Amino acid sequence: MNIEEINHLAKLSGLELDPHQTKQVSMELENILSLVAELQSVDTTGVEPLFHPIAVIEPLSQALRMDIVSEDNNRINNMLSAPISHEGLYLVPKVIE
Amino acid sequence: MTRSNWEVVIGLETHAQLKTNSKIFSGASIAFGAEPNVQACPVDLALPGTLPVLNQEAVNHAIRFGLAIGSKIAPISVFARKNYFYPDLPKGYQISQFELPVVVGGRIAIEVDGVKKEIQLTRAHLEEDAGKSLHDDFVGLHGEKSSGIDLNRAGTPLLEIVTDPVMRSAAEAVAYAKELHSLVMWIGICDGNMQEGSFRCDANVSVRPIGQQEFGTRCEIKNLNSFKFLEEAIQYEVQRQIELIEDGGVVKQETRLYDPDRQETRSMRSKEDAQDYRYFPDPDLLPLHITQDMIATIQASMPALPSILRNTWQTEYGLSDYDASLLTQSKSTADYFVELLTLIKEDLVKPAVNLMSGDLASALNRDGIEAAQSPLRPSHLAQILLRIQDGTISNKIAKDIFATLWERGTSGALADQGVVDALIEEKGLKQISDVGAIEKIIDQVLLDNPKSVEEYRSGKEKAFNSLVGQIMKASKGKANPSQVNQVLKEKLSN
Amino acid sequence: MSWHEKSLTELSSALSAKEISSVELTQFFLGRIAKFKGLNAYLDVQEEFSLRDALVADQKIARGEAGPLTGIPVAHKDVFVTKDWKSTAASKMLESYLSPYDARVVELLGGSGAGMVCLGKTNMDEFAMGSSNENSAYGPALNPWNTNYVSGGSSGGSAVAVAAGLTPIATGTDTGGSIRQPAAFCGITGIKPTYGSVSRYGMIAYASSLDQAGPMGKSAKDCALILNAISGHDPRDSTSLRKDAIDYQALLGKPWSNGSLPLQGLRIGVPEEYFAQGLQEEVREAVQAALKKFEELGATCISVSLPKTKLSIPVYYVLAPAEASSNLSRYDGVRYGYRAKEYKDLNQMYERSRSEGFGAEVKRRILIGSYVLSQGYYDAYYLQAQKIRRIIAEDFQTAFTQCDVLMGPVAPQVAWKVGEKSKDPVEMYLEDIYTLSPNLAGLPAMSIPCGMSQQGLPIGLQVIGNYFSEAKMLQVADQFQQNSSWHLLAPSSAGAQI
């Protein structure tokens, strides 16, 4: 993977890579990708993906929740670990649209 | 304002907030206007360890919509994660539907300048709304300018409704948006409140030379929350693209915002440009199975759609296009009319329609309320119509009765039965239809107005009306107008 | 016998017989935890909260309202959120995070449930990513048998705590072997139940379709007790199975069939791929000796094949990072967690907070995860892996037509020295070869001690069952433990300073 690809990947992942690290990270990722390249050798024609493991023995369907309000205002507790807030709002560096 | 050799291609994506009590994946309330973050529970905040569970009513609403537009409702649909970073998106991904949406296909009929057209829909799918960023100048940890994030809205159920790119003008787009808006309110899945953000349109706009098969590059204009802005934005964008191309430029595929003050679209600071959303099925949610039974249950409780009602009423009662449209402009009006129909015989239908489209419509408009909130209930209108029909009151008196009862009803609920008769009695509004009585009044008026009689006899038609006026005045409006006409004519021709 | 050597049933009896109170028992373990701090098994201990809960338990016992677990201490892997203890997932990202709610597992075992007393949160690999507990932001947990060696991971802290007698029992989670492998390395018993048996609500997510919680303790019997308490449908977890409750203790002590020997009729499938090249000789010997023991107890061993065993590694290392990359996107410093000190704008705040808050292995897996999900690679990597996953699951079903349970080693080798494998991540991934497949298939799997290496490090035997067969697995494991004493060995008996 070249520098551009790594940086693009980092951006997608919300990560910042030290320029010193980029080479190291690139090598490590290459190794992992070599490991997983083996996947290509398997013929999976006609095989459906198994997104939920138990689906292999029984059909699974999403449960539906009754439409009632079941959560109270617990703002104080929920926001206990907020890095910074103001009058109930979470603050972040200004977003420009 | 398009040049004659360009074709405009428009597709609309609409986000309708579904009318539920709680969020699509959590039990927090979705009520509008609460204090920041008091309706954001741990699931909405994406606290570590939280998981989504699907709201049944959101699914029901999707089914309702699918049925209303004649689409296919997927027996199995899958929720997928749309991954991107933004402060109003707590999980760092939005739970949406990608490859397998809940509703596929469908169509909505529109009419523009008398021309009917069917707009094909590509699909509709369920997803969650994001929170809100408030861009007031808050001050951050290190003194930096900051935005405030309110996650009350995060997790509100949305139905994203996508059309094929089949609209060819801003007018068509607006007509479609209005029909869709009407429809989602009609079937009760969305309150349609555009100011509160319950109904938001994104327009995908491109142009191509007439005759060209391939589509031109399209731009997406986001978050248009009024029909006026929708129209203006599309018009501006079409113009912009045409001019750009004609000047030798190339349209860049991008997302744009409409600035209503400047009346122009401008490029958004790459929030979503060239984004790879890395969609994959959400492992925290199982596939959504919708059975025929579920669909049948929903179908059974759905209201008749406006187009069906219009057809029925036009066929059965011979209503005009105009009247039928008026009566189906809102479910409230249609329900009112339906109720009224149960209280009158067929020979009163046309007068009923006139009364609804006349006095009732004006009063509702003036007071800014829906038919459901009208102080005069269908039973009251039925009583009025009956008394006109049996000659007890004239049309004019009926108007007065209407106005009086409206006022009284606004300050305190009216009794269901007998109110009209009571008022007629109270104010002595009974029409004078007795020929003898009328003759007496007319004789007196003729005596008192010799000049008008003269003028009439010398050919001035206007004098007739003047005499009628005097007669009505003398009878305090209670003389039966058609009787008056007839008798007066007789007397004057002698 | 000291209190830390007693089984859960023995402790329960002692409590109801008033031989000891919950408060005293809790104090005893808190004392040991403090004494053996050097093992770094615990990340957060709050004595006042533990004693508070012990007091409540004692009151319950006094009123005669005690259940089989009331008043008995338990340690929770720091991947479960708790209201009274920090929940860090061993990451700097959640250094001082306080959850407003308790995980379902914690609720079920705590005061409003079974009445156990939480001793604290145990160490783990950061966000459950790792096989040695060396990926913790707070230092590795050390193997009590020899502190120069790793504890295994990711539930290293829980394994160490149980093995060193710092808790009678602990909870762990297993995504690719994270209960079984540290259990094997530390000489204790651990079980990962069928996917969906235990609620994931309140479990800090790593890989959603693979994560599953389970007990880690000194015996199959003890694990069964805990499994009963923590399993069951939770409507807050959509992947939680809607099945009738299973009594995991129901078959304990019962013979497998009507035969003369306790495990007569039991067919044990032995996957040939689990004994191929790469398996350390000592481990092979210990496992084979254990299989012989099972035969002595009446079972029959049959050779079976799980052809995609090796392939489970790339499949896992595509799927788990993919899901993790998305599950960890919520850690952005906005609503909780670590926020960088310096940043010039929003994007930088995100990137710095996450890059500084996450350790190297976590970042690696996030990057790989984003890669395999990205445009152009999704089909070849993610989708392909999910398809092979189905083949792996079907291969197990085929194997189970020939046998009742599968048995083999847990890991190719015993614990390695701290730092020995941290240079090359892939080297460590390869160690997961035997444990990954059951997670991919969602099958229940457990580890029981079955031997010791020459250097005095424990060796574990893996038992893999078909879906929902945990009661049978525990029955089989218990029979082994009734007829052997590997699980009774403790570091102190081996001469370690514990």
Image: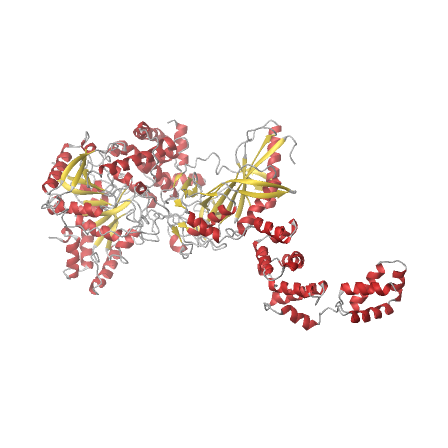
Of B120 and C215, nearer the camera is B120
Looking at the picture, the colour scheme in use is secondary structure
Q: Is residue C40 visible?
A: no
Of C62 and B184, nearer the camera is B184
Question: Quarter-wise, where is residue C271 in the image?
Answer: top left
Residue A8 spot, x, y in % from top left: 41, 32
Question: Quarter-wise, where is residue B484 in the image?
Answer: bottom right
Count of residue discs: 0
Of B52 and B473, nearer the camera is B473
Residue C63 spot, x, y in % from top left: 21, 65
Question: Quarter-wise, where is residue C448 in the image?
Answer: top left
At horizontal 28% and vertical 37% (from top left) the residue drawn is C393
Q: Is residue A5 visible?
A: yes
Residue C174 left/right relative to B384 = left
Is A70 drawn above or below residue C473 in the view shown?
A: below
Residue B435 left/right relative to C310 = right
At horizontal 58% and vertical 48% (from top left) the residue drawn is B307
Of C285 and A59, nearer the camera is A59
Residue B376 left/right relative to B22 = right
Is A28 drawn above or below residue C189 in the view shown?
A: above
